[in-house]
Amino acid sequence: MNILVTFDENYAAPFKTMLKSLAINNASEKVVVYLLYSENKIRQETLEDLIRYCGSYGVVFKPCIIDNEIFSKYKVNKHYSSAMYYRLLASEFLPKDIDRIIYLDPDILIINSLSPLWKLELKDKKIFAAASHTEAFTDSINMMRLNTETEYFNTGVLLMDLKSIRDQISFEELVREIEEVDSFLILPDQDIFNVLFSDVTLSIPDEIWNYDARYYSKYLLQSNREYDLDWVMKNTVILHFCGKKKPWNTKNINTKFDSLYKHYMQLENPFKKVKDIQEK
């Protein structure tokens, strides 16, 4: 199972929590994590620490450096760094022998098996799979704003068919699209993704694959109270801690799932305990 992440120094610690949850709940999978990063955005000591940390969970961690000048002219703000564009370039910068990968934001928990998403068949010329968090009214606004015809996808979780992407879109086309829609960008890389790829993206249920942890009550009401906490713990695979308030930055509880996140933050490595027992 190939996993793609993109983050800077500020998200190294949250990535560790995400990685821990991924490894614990997918223990039977052989996982390789690829990090696309800029040299001046993450320290060498941090990379070496992450390699060791991932290794302690049986996960291979492969950093892949990107020239930090590539996106210096494009739109960023205090909440969105240039690293947000890297997932759009994954097919260009990852090894060409990788045909499929799952992109994951670092501000998530994996609480069940990722295998069904990893094995998901992309049909009808689809080259991505993603979930939407938006309502019909918001979708309509985004369609008008971006001149698209489909629902607005959240790019925090993406299944990517890299081989098909390489065949169908070039880096030059991507850069040209960024330049053309720059003035309309609100969530820059997510907007670009929807402009370029929404019509070749398979929609997957967000309550399973990209559950917005802020909106437990909304999911509960929309499901006629089916998606309660028991349902989420059994069926949801990915909890996404969207928004500015992150569970690792506050002692307050902002979502139903902040305590679960803090539990994973503090959880000891169970694989180390098994190794220690085996060596005795």
Image: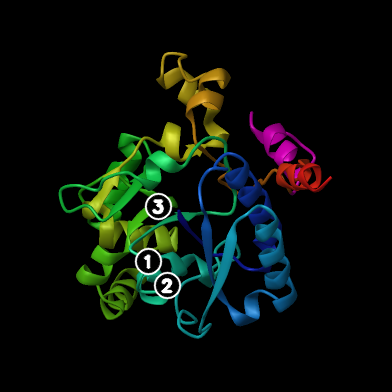
Label 2 Cα neighbours within 10 Å, binned few <14 / some 14-19 / many ≥20: some
Location of mark 1 (residue) = 98
At 32% across and 37% down in the image, what residue appears? 137
| Helix, strand or loop at mark 3 | strand
User: Residue 275, can we see it?
Assistant: yes
Q: Earlier in the sequence, mark 3 or mark 1?
A: 1
Task: For marks 3 and 2, give the one nearer the viewer.
Answer: 2
Q: Are marks 2 and 1 in contact (CB under 8 Å)?
A: yes
User: Which segment is the magenta one?
Assistant: 249-265
For residue 258, above or below residue 178: above
Task: For marks 2 and 1, give the one nearer the viewer.
Answer: 1
Relative depth, front residue between 105 and 271: 271
Label 1 Cα neighbours within 10 Å, binned few <14 / some 14-19 / many ≥20: few
x and y, in percent, of residue 64 in the image: 52, 75
Callout 3 amino acid: Leu
Relative depth, front residue between 206 and 274: 274
| Helix, strand or loop at mark 1 | loop
Give me the C-alpha separation between circle 3 and circle 1.
Answer: 15 Å
Q: Earlier in the sequence, mark 3 or mark 2?
A: 2
Residue 264 included in the magenta stretch of the image: yes
Task: For marks 3 and 1, give the one nearer the viewer.
Answer: 1
x and y, in percent, of residue 238 in the image: 51, 39
Residue 92 lies in what quarter of the image? bottom left
Location of mark 3 (residue) = 158
Q: Residue furthest left?
A: 124
For residue 89, above or below residue 244: below
Callout 2 amino acid: Leu
| Helix, strand or loop at mark 2 | loop
At 20% across and 68% down in the image, what residue appears? 168
Q: Residue furthest right?
A: 280
User: Residue 254, can we see it?
Assistant: no
Location of mark 2 (residue) = 94
